[in-house]
Image: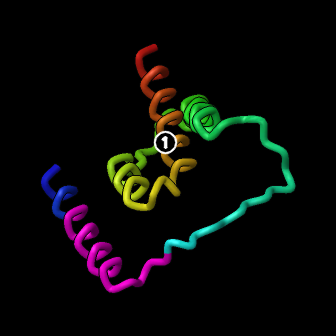
Amino acid sequence: TGGDIVLLSKLHNMIKQKYNKGLYSNNYSYTYKSNVPNELSDFNMGQRNAYYDYKNKKHFKLYPKLLINFLNLISNHRLNEIKEYIDGYNYESKRLKSK
């Protein structure tokens, strides 16, 4: 919608200004280690949670897919896990709605 585009444009401009001032480092590294082994992909976790919401709550969550895709793009794909989770959730929720 128009409001989303204005919001994303403002966000883009703010990030660009800070980037041009050198406020972001290119030496990013982060390692996440969980004590619980997880065999599911992020996409599959999204699917599983959509199914849970369908069975138990009878409604689905709305995630800001456009915003996450934009942030993932400008962050050099550092939000891939979140993006994949949302993709899986949305895929499964559409599949379940069509039943």
Please state which of residues 57 and 77 is positioned toward the viewer in this rendering. 77
Establish if 55 lies above or below 20.
above
Q: Residue at x 21, y 70 (%)?
A: 10
Q: Determine the secondary structure under disc 1.
A: helix
* Overall secondary structure of the magenta section: helix
Q: Position of residue 14 (x, y in %)?
A: 27, 76
Q: Rate crowding at label 1 as few (under 14), some (14 to 19) or many (20 or more) other CA atoms within 10 Å.
A: many
- Give the residues in magenta: 7-25
**Is residue 56 visible in the rendered structure shown here?**
no
Left or right: where 20 falls relative to 93: left
Q: Is residue 43 magenta?
A: no
The answer to if 22 sits in the magenta stretch is yes
Q: Nearer the viewer, residue 74 or 66?
A: 74
Question: Residue 45 location, x and y as percent?
Answer: 64, 38
The residue indicated by pointer 1 is 86
Question: Do we see residue 57 in this rendering?
Answer: yes
Residue at position x 79%, y 58% in the image: 33
The residue shown at (63%, 32%) is 44
Q: Tell me: 95 left or right of 53.
A: left
Q: Quadrant of residue 37?
A: top right
User: In the image, what residue type sits under mark 1?
Assistant: Ile
> Where is residue 66 shown, x and y percent of the image?
33, 48
Q: Position of residue 87 (x, y in %)?
A: 47, 36
